[in-house]
């Protein structure tokens, strides 16, 4: 076996960018890269370990002997160790053995930039490259239109390990199998996008992927990196965008991971008040360290570049923004101005979003941010964080709280649903019914609905109808689209057998048709983030628990009139005011028989009357089914 040969992929400019936190393509430099040097094939290795006094590559090619392949430290105080090892190639398993200047500490670490990792419980990195030939050029050319803020954006959130399992063999579906089954299903359900819970390599299944150790490697649980590319490619070939959950907020303390990497707090903040998550028993990135910012921003761009992702949903943003997040007095230190905002994290998020949109203006970044922190989805040049969208957690909380109430009590809680309109347009909001709402004893979405079987399903249908006609984009977690009855269990497949029963078939058909309605009606998406796109007709009829409103697009002819009845009492001949005369035609009804409804409360097309109502000059009488929604448009 040949020894390490001095070689570098870094230029002086690369080093300057890295040190200043402005190198956003570090994955082209760091890690393991198969190459040929002076006619000899081998692999170049590079790792950042500034507190190390010796770094060796150990692996299956040198019997894990640290004396065989010690790397060379650069002379420029960058802390980078590198070198070329002949005859090491694709499939070789390796780690970095690091001897620290810090009290002689010795660590053995997986490569932070590895493109492939061993299947858990093994923790080695694998030298890897692929020559996957992408077939999604047609999608990439038009995705700016599909990802625009004035386009329909309906997201199906998926946990790959539990969406569906191979029952006979008791295993996960592979990336290749999901490229057939999952893609076909999402397309049949008419969703515009799919969001995958973290696919970056992680060691512990119960973390659902949110404790990442391999930031540049798709998890080996389901196959090879090129097979994950195939899955993305198949979504694109079927006109479905793919959003990846991304976790720059924290990382686990596993011995092979980023924690205490070179015997020092390298990636994490050295102050436990800023560098340790008490809730998740994990470490927090040091957002004030330039090299760490470069690592994270490079990682964001990596998934957009190498895996053609159409967006990143950034996890746990609130925990990044606040120094006192989930901490008691005395457990945190104020910033330089005496406040609780993490100024370094705010700066990092702005830089990340600027870098993403500069290179990929046709994607979206979406913040999971649960507080009232202002301007999350506003441009950085006016002081915002620069995200494309933000999850509307307040809407989710208030809405689920309202629908959990017995309908007899709903007249006293009308404000639970109307309150969202007081702040709906302060951000570009996405309405999420995510995995977080169906775990830890919260029950499934269906399980929260009150009443007998018919009422529970009618409640669920009217909830979804309200969601899809509320301003903003939408996200539904797997299983919610057919009324899964049990809480989500990451260890088991969804309850697909429920689709043998009519109520669940009805919910599934409703979601298919709501997605079609959303995609086909410009009034539901063209102004989904603008107050011009919404107008109450009447939000004050608490006695009947009825809500009526209009959704508007660029053209008056596209206006949709929506009426929701939140009680099991049908409202026949219910009068609503309208802005102009004309003839109204029903375009959606949640009570139809294909949805497991009664089918008894259809509205025939009828003309308005010049009878003032709801402070408008014209009105019409309609039938609103029990626990139902009806939508109308003016006919030509």
Image (spheres, rainbow, N blue to C red):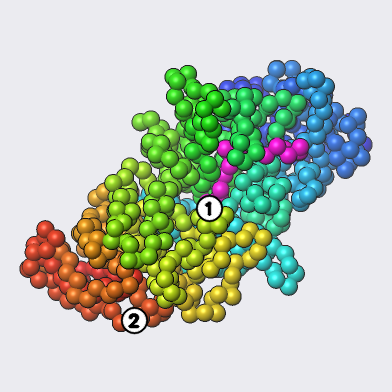
369 or 348, nearer to the observer: 369
Report the residue at 70% width, 35% height from top: 258
Q: Gap in Å between the C-alphas at discs 1 and 2?
A: 34 Å
- Give coordinates of residue 87: x percent, y percent: 86, 40
Q: Residue at x 74, y 21 (%)?
A: 51
Residue 254 falls inside the magenta stretch: yes
Magenta segment range? 242-257
Residue 74 drawn above or below residue 624 = above
**Residue 561 visible in this rendered orientation of the protein:** no
Disc 2 element: loop
Question: How busy is the neighbourhood of tag 1: few (under 14 within 10 Å), some, or many (20 plus)?
Answer: few
Q: Which residue is mark 2?
A: 599
Q: Position of residue 215 (x, y in %)?
A: 65, 42
Q: Where's residue 52, x and y in %? A: 77, 23
Give the answer, above or below, for where 385 lies relative to 513: above
Query: Would residue 9 be seen by someone viewing this image from the given angle?
Result: yes
Question: Is residue 569 left or right of 597 when viewed as pictured?
Answer: left
Q: Residue 449, percent across and down?
A: 44, 66
Q: Residue at x 73, y 73 (%)?
A: 168
Question: On screen, 182 above or below 509?
Answer: above
Magenta stretch: helix, strand or loop mostly = loop
In the rendered image, the quadrant that contains the N terminus is top right
Q: Which residue is mark 1?
A: 436
């Amino acid at each position: 076996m040949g020894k390490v040969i001095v070689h570098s992929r870094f230029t002086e400019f690369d080093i300057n960018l890295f040190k200043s936190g402005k190198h956003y393509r570090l994955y082209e430099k760091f890690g393991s890269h198969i190459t040929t040097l002076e006619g000899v094939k081998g692999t170049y290795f590079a790792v950042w370990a500034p507190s190390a006094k010796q770094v060796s590559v150990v692996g299956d090619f040198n019997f894990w002997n640290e004396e065989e392949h010690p790397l060379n430290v650069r002379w420029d105080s960058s802390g980078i160790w590198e070198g070329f090892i002949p005859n090491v190639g694709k499939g070789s398993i390796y780690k970095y053995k690091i001897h620290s200047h810090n009290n002689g500490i010795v660590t053995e670490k997986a490569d932070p930039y590895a493109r492939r990792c061993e299947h858990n419980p093994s923790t080695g990195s694998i030298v890897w490259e692929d020559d996957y030939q992408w077939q999604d050029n047609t999608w990439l050319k038009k995705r700016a239109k599909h990802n625009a803020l004035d386009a329909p954006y309906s997201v199906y959130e998926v946990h790959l390990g539990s969406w569906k399992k191979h029952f006979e063999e008791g295993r996960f579906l592979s990336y290749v199998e999901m490229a057939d089954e999952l893609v076909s299903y999402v397309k049949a359900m008419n969703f515009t996008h799919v969001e995958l819970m973290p696919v970056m390599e992680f060691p512990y299944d119960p973390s659902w992927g949110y404790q990442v150790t391999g930031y540049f490697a798709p998890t080996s649980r389901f196959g090879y990196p090129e097979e994950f590319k195939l899955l993305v490619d198949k979504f694109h070939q079927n006109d479905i965008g793919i959003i990846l959950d991304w976790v720059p907020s924290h990382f686990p303390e596993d011995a092979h991971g980023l924690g205490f990497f070179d015997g020092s707090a390298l990636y994490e903040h050295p102050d436990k008040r800023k560098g340790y998550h008490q809730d998740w028993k994990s470490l927090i990135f040091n957002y004030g360290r330039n090299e760490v910012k470069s690592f994270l921003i490079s990682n964001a761009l990596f998934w957009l570049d190498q895996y053609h992702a159409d967006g990143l949903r950034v996890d746990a943003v609130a925990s990044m923004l606040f120094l006192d997040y989930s901490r008691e007095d005395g457990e945190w230190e104020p910033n330089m101005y005496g406040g609780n905002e993490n100024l370094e994290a705010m700066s990092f998020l702005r830089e990340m979003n600027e870098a993403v949109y500069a290179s990929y203006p046709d994607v979206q970044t979406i913040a999971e941010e649960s507080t009232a922190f202002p301007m999350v989805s506003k441009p950085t040049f006016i002081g915002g964080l620069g995200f494309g969208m933000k999850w509307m957690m307040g809407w989710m909380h208030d809405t689920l709280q309202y629908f959990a109430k017995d309908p007899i009590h709903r007249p006293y809680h009308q404000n639970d649903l109307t309150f969202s309109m007081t702040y709906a347009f302060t951000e570009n909001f996405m309405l999420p019914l995510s995995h977080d709402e169906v775990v830890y004893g919260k029950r499934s979405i269906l399980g929260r609905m009150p009443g007998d079987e018919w009422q529970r399903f009618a409640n669920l249908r009217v909830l979804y109808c309200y969601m899809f006609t509320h301003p903003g984009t939408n996200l539904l977690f797997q299983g919610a689209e057919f009324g899964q009855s049990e809480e989500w269990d990451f260890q088991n497949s969804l309850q697909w057998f429920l689709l043998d029963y009519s109520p669940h078939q009805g919910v599934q058909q409703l979601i298919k048709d709501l997605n079609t309605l959303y995609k086909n009606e410009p009034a539901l998406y063209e102004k989904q983030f603008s107050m011009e796109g919404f107008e109450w007709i009447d939000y004050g009829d608490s006695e009947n628990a009825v809500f009526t409103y209009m959704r508007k697009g660029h053209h008056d002819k596209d206006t949709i009139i929506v009426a929701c009845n939140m009680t099991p009492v049908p409202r026949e001949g219910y009068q609503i005011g309208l802005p102009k005369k004309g003839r109204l035609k029903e375009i959606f009804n949640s009570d139809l028989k294909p949805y497991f409804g009664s089918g008894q409360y259809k509205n025939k097309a009828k003309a308005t009357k010049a009878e003032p109502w709801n402070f408008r000059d014209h009105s019409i009488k309609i039938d609103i089914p029990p626990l139902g929604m009806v939508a109308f448009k003016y006919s030509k």
